[in-house]
Amino acid sequence: MIQFIQRSIVLGITLLFGSTGETITEKSGHLNLGIPGIMYVGGISGVIGAFLYENGVGAENMVPILAVLIPLLCCIAGSLLMGLIYSFFTVSLRANQNVTGLALTTLGTGIGNFFGGSLIKLLKSDVPFISLGGTSRYFKAQLPFADKLGWFGQLFLSYSFLAYVAIFIAIFTAWLLKKTRVGLHLRAVGENPATADAAGIPVGKYKYFATCIGAVIAGLGGLFYVMDYSGGIWANNAFGDLGWLSIALVIFTVWRTDIGILGSFIFGALLIIHNYITNLGMAGQELIKVVPYVVTIIVLIVVSARERRETQPPQALGQSYFREDR
């Protein structure tokens, strides 16, 4: 049971990064369906940085701080670039957000598979994946006293630093959106950009800022998945539906990142529970895998029926803002 909870939380952290990033973006009024592609680019960017460093100096000669910092910076750079591309098309050029997001997902997946396949060819390996065990060891480092605290240490203190970073970002984002002037302005931009613009709020800057920050946070989810959950192994098309589940999790948590912490762990558990149920056939496994989507649809129906403003998406979500129409 402890192992099941641990694996659920670790997988859930990937979803938490993605959903937190998407929530910030949606609060500015932009629906970024490119999150799966951004997570993919974030993961492969970190892999490229780790690959160059680990194979350049050798796994035994790696400096711990550089082993973590280089992939982290590469991941941030790649994710930020994707966020800027999306912002340029949807904010500056006012392109359709849905089409741009889907194109970004296709682009990100293609970039990941291209560079992932290229690195595999460079290694001249017979296996269709890249193993970065040396780098992963530093990313998965746990608190030294976790094992001495029994079940409490195993359940709450046995995770890598990025897991705690994800939880901190989710809690900080919830506080920022509800208690600060910046959060108030961002929510105003997402609810009614024309009114926010008339009040002197720089709508374009807030949209760019929220979208790019959201992309960086989502990209960290891709890096976490590769370096922590997968143990440093990159394989093309290994992310599955995690990016789309992150978007579904935003609806499940009614656009609240603090609730997203619990929601991500629940989704993580539902994704792997079939591995812990004996005598479960292929049909049963597929039915269990679809549960998160069914739950999300039910939550969406319930939220829509209640019509409470605090549980509704931003009013201008998905709508391009034309200042001339104000």
Image (cartoon, helix red, strand yellow):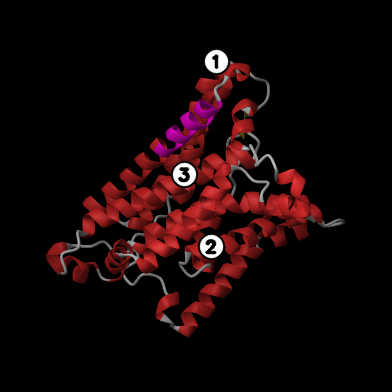
Give percent across and percent down for residue 38. 44, 44
Q: Give the range drawn in magenta.
A: 64-76
Let me know if residue 251 is in the magenta part: no
Nearest the viewer among 192 and 213 is 213
Task: Identify which amino acid the numbered label 2 is placed on.
Answer: Gly
Earlier sequence position, callout 3 versus callout 2: 3
The x, y position of residue 232, in whole percent, is: 62, 33
- Closer to the chain start, of discs 1 and 2, is 1
Kindly identify which numbered label has been placed on residue 263: none
| Quadrant, the C terminus | bottom left
Q: Quadrant location of residue 22?
A: bottom left
Label 1: which residue? 57
Q: Quick check: 207 above or below 190?
A: above
Residue at the spot of label 3: 219
**Callout 2 crowding tier (Cα within 10 Å): few <14, some 14–19, many ≥20:** many
**Which of marks 1 and 3 precedes in the sequence?**
1
Could you tell me which secondary element the residue under label 1 belongs to? helix
Q: Quadrant for residue 33, please give it.
A: bottom left
Residue located 39% across and 55% down the image:
32
Task: Residue 236: name its quadrant.
Answer: top right
Q: Nearer the viewer, residue 262 or 11?
A: 262
Q: Nearer the viewer, mark 3 or mark 2?
A: 2
Q: Which amino acid, mark 1?
A: Val
In whole angstroms, how far apart are the C-alphas of marks 3 and 2?
A: 17 Å
Label 3 packing within 10 angstroms: few (<14), some (14-19), many (20+): many
Judged from this view, the residue extending furthest toward the bottom is: 306
Q: What element carries label 3?
A: helix
Q: What residue is at 37 percent from the left and 68 percent from the top?
A: 179
The answer to whether one can see residue 239 in this image is: yes
Q: What element carries label 2?
A: helix
On the image, numbered disc 2 is attached to which residue? 260
